[in-house]
Image: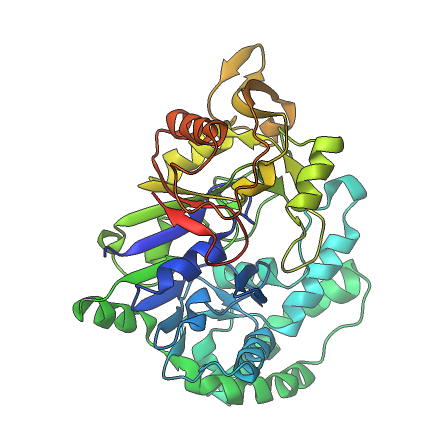
Amino acid sequence: MSNIVVFGSQWGDEGKGKIVDMLAADSAAIVRFQGGNNAGHTLVVGGEKCILHLIPSGILHPGKICLIGNGVVLDPEVFLHEIDTLAAKGLDVSPARLMVSKKTHVIISYHRALDSAREGSRAKGAKIGTTGRGIGPCYEDKMHRCGIRAGDLADPELLREKIKSALEEKNVLFAKLYECEPMDPERVFQELLPFAERLRPYLGDVSTAIEQAVAAGGTVLFEGAQGTHLDIDHGTYPFVTSSTTVSGNAASGSGCSPRMLERIIAIVKAYTTRVGGGPFATELLDATGDYLQEKGGEFGATTGRRRRCGWLDMVVLRESARLNGPTELAVTKLDVLSGLPELKICVEYEYRGGRIKHPPQEENGMAYVTPVYETLPGWTEDITQVASWAALPKNAQAYLARMEELSGVPIGMVSVGPDRSQTFTR
């Protein structure tokens, strides 16, 4: 098998975790290359639900090496809680098969405090919809070159000094701008020490681990978080995440050559959802939107927030294809559409007196588009046990075929239910 990148083609929550879990069975190493615990992967294996926020989904497969790359921001407390939860289920989460890059930036308590203070100070209509988990402030410190990296956790004196230095500026913001209590650097340091001690055995050179896996003839699976339209550069700015979510970042965020990225799979939900603020052209604020939300169980894996639901937006998907270069699509939650008499697909936008096939490039331009729809007939059959393309209802096949035609990308996998077994390849 070729090395694989799995990315979300919409606003996240497309079902990447399930597809990664499926592909992990034939992979030697699974790498998480961006984001933090502001995203979650919900997996259902044998009817049992498992939610992961940081550890790659491949951890559920015995013998697989799971790596957290330098492009991730890692909350030590959350990471260790996940380890303990998985260990309690009898899974091997030892350093022998789980590694964190020494270059991975670490979320500290002051990042979470700053995140919450900033979001709380914004006017109602200007809120970004951040999870408050410190992701943005941690990436900000990375770019400001004052961040704490995982490798620093092995050097207590360096760690103490870096915390002290970081809080000199942040405490001014806490006290003067946000009118909250400054944080004591020594207390922050002491609170972090127990987590640092436990995390140290997991620190390593992820770049070398990837190189060794490939040299041994194994497949490396690169796993992203969020979706393309939450990308800091290419998403619906400023209602985006704080990292680069597109497939090209799999190389930079992991520490390998782009030439290693061979098979690129776009995960696309059969309809569209979004969590938090920001423009959403095909959003349905009616009974159909409620139907999709309820039948699809559309609640965020990390926050529990209700997801906004709408028709499939091919303008969004077309842009994702342009930015990521997928070799195939993996369509998820097709079963949720069963029972709707007709289905709509947004094929273009009306914008400033014309028609466009890609999102406008201006900030918040998406707030001023009007979707142009095609209508296709729905189907009533239960497809949750379907195991092949030919066994799908004809109208379901036609819906998928139109998705291929409009995106220019072939469909390689289809998911018809939440369980690992409810996915077939074409």
Q: Position of residue 219 (x, y in %)?
A: 26, 62
Between 75 and 333, the one nearer to me in the picture: 333
Residue 270 location, x and y as percent?
52, 38
* Tally of marks: 0
Q: Residue furthest right?
A: 179
- Residues 339 and 227: in front is 339
Along the horizontal axis of the image, is 237 left or right of 426?
Answer: right
Residue 30 appearing in the image:
yes
Q: Residue at x 46, y 45 (%)?
A: 386
Image quadrant in which the C terminus is located: top left
Location of residue 407 in the rendering, given as x and y in whole percent from the top left corner: 40, 29
Position of residue 57 measured from the top left corner of the image (x, y, whole percent) = 46, 65
Residue at point 51% right, 14% down? 355
Q: In front here: 178 or 25? A: 25
Q: Quadrant of residue 321?
A: top left
Q: Is residue 66 above or below residue 280?
A: below
